[in-house]
Image (cartoon, helix red, strand yellow):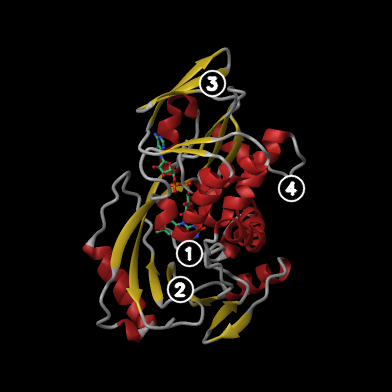
Amino acid sequence: MGAGVAGLAAAQALLLQGASVSIVERGALGMESSWAGGGILAPLCPWDYAGEVTRLTGLGAAMYPQWVAGLHAATGIDSEYEVSGMLVLPPFDRKLARQWCDEHGLMLADKDGGLLLPEVAQVRNPRLIQALRKHVEILGGRIVEQCEVRGIEVRGGRVQAVTTSGGEFSADRYIVSAGAWSKQVLGQYALKLDIKPMRGQMLLFKFDTPPLPHIVLQDGMYLIPRRDGHLLVGSTLEDVGFDKRTTTEARDSLQQRAERLLPALHNMPLVQHWSGLRPASPGNIPTIGRHPQLENLYLNSGHFRYGVTMAPASAAILLNELYGVEQPFDVSVYRAGWSA
Ligand SMILES: Cc1cc2nc3c(=O)[nH]c(=O)nc-3n(C[C@H](O)[C@H](O)[C@H](O)COP(=O)(O)OP(=O)(O)OC[C@H]3O[C@@H](n4cnc5c(N)ncnc54)[C@H](O)[C@@H]3O)c2cc1C
């Protein structure tokens, strides 16, 4: 339920295991947070996050090269995975950053007064979504768009069916991957789950060739150069509920801050300005796994700022649980969200 990167990655992994999968999506596939994101495949300042976050982003980032290569081979769609590196500019805790990178075996180098993390990669998330869609279809998955889940029917400790705007659907197992709307989809079965929307606004510019050699990050704001000269500038972090409007304040502030880092942006026409609703969770720790009371209901949501990075790892962890396979590390923390 929900066809963002979390739902699609899980569907693809299940199909590859031979399961039969239907995805029910309220709107058009992949057009919410997963489309709106920047596609940086790492936390912005990884040293600011708990191990529960960086273990998952680390596993996800490590899986990406093979994942996107497989998608490319199967679909012909290039997700534009690129190890472009990320330059982190002050202010940040340099000592902590060095120590963290040392401990986690991450390369880093001094550059332009900041620290360059040369191994950080990016992906063009709208392309990744297209590739996932095509692969799910090739593998025989059924995608039902414009179909809103409206209720979950439970009997005897099991989900019997879900009711949707397009009728009733039933299956052996159900996975909720409805991003910022996951709590709404679960309704009374959300228990203590704390997932809420957190708006992020982005700007898009176009140069003839990439204006920067790396992703550049300063104080929560980043510039992401794409291969074809597009430059993304993001993002805001706004607690405004399910309000997806863009604002002139955010546009002006992002543009001014970006211009200070890249003067060539001055007078550059804005190609697009959009926003997306991230599925925000406490500590950026997603909830992945079985519902504590309903044996055939699962959640894969709450990836907040790093859902694109975490997608393949999160799907793998979910599948390990579904099939009773040993996990790569202790994943009990990703079940804690139900009872937080
Ligand atoms: C501005 C911005 C920048 C970001 N940058 C990055 C980044 O650089 N790197 C990174 O890793 N992550 C980034 N993210 C975060 C990332 O985009 C999200 O964590 C991720 O996309 C979440 O995926 P999802 O599938 O859970 O949610 P979504 O993509 O929002 O998908 C949920 C889907 O569920 C559907 N749905 C909702 N309700 C129902 C219902 N009742 N019935 C059926 N379907 C329903 C929705 O229509 C939607 O398609 C960014 C996000 C934003 C907004």
Would you name the residue on which mark 1 appears?
124
Would you name the residue on which mark 3 appears?
159
Amino acid of disc 1: Arg
Q: Nearer the viewer, residue 186 or 105?
A: 186
Mark 3 crowd level (few <14, some 14–19, many ≥20, 10 Å Cα): some
Would you name the residue on which mark 4 appears?
329
Relative to 76, residue 283 above or below: above
Mark 1 residue element = loop
Tell me whether circle 4 and circle 1 mark residues in contact (CB < 8 Å): no
Of circles 4 and 1, the one toward us is 1
Residue at left 62%, top 62%?
Answer: 69
Q: Upstream in the sequence, badge 2 or badge 3?
A: 3
Q: Nearer the viewer, residue 90 or 44?
A: 44
Relative to 36, residue 18 above or below: above
Task: Report how far apart the C-alphas of labels 4 and 2 lie in the structure.
Answer: 34 Å
Residue at left 62%, top 23%?
Answer: 295
Would you name the residue on which mark 2 appears?
226
Q: Nearer the viewer, residue 84 or 77?
A: 77
